[in-house]
Image (cartoon, grey):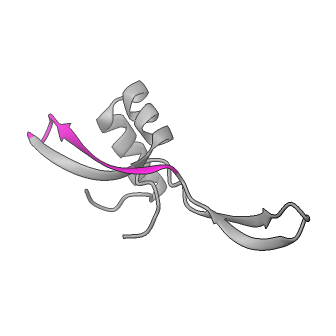
Amino acid sequence: MSRICQVTGKKALSGNKVSHSKRRTKRKFYPNLFEKKYYLAEEDRWITLKVSAAGMRLINKNGLTAALKEAREKGYIVNY
């Protein structure tokens, strides 16, 4: 599975690693991802999501079902 948050859609960004001598080489900035299990009460089962720290905050703020619905609408998650 790729390093993409299933709730927010965050993925790796590219940029430059800058040394002390200001020499630039390409690098990647990865999102802060976790594999986390959530209990989906509507379906009476546990689901495992690959979610970023910002995605966890979004789930805590809006609720799991609302966050999953929004992620499905935006195309970040196909099935869970």
Q: Where in the figure is residue 57, as x and y percent of width and height? A: 45, 32
Report the quarter where the C terminus lies: bottom left
* Up-down relation of residue 65 to residue 8 (above or below): above
Q: Where in the figure is residue 14, as x and y percent of width and height? A: 69, 67
Q: Where in the figure is residue 43, as x and y percent of width and height? A: 12, 42
Whether residue 43 appears in magenta in the rendering, the answer is yes
Query: Quarter of the image holding residue 20?
Result: bottom right
Report the quarter where the N terminus lies: bottom left
Which residue is the extreme one toward the front? Answer: 20
Residue 9 horizontal side relative to residue 61, left or right: right
Magenta span covers which residues?
32-44
Q: Please give the name of the residue rendered at 41% of the width and 37% of the height, measured from the top-left corner.
A: 56
Q: Where in the figure is residue 12, as x and y percent of width and height? A: 58, 63
Q: Please give the name of the residue rendered at 42% of the width and 44% of the height, measured from the top-left corner.
A: 70
Q: Please give the name of the residue rendered at 14% of the width and 34% of the height, measured from the top-left corner.
A: 41
Residue 77 horizontal side relative to residue 47, left or right: right
Q: In this orientation, which residue lies closer to the viewer: 51 or 61?
A: 51
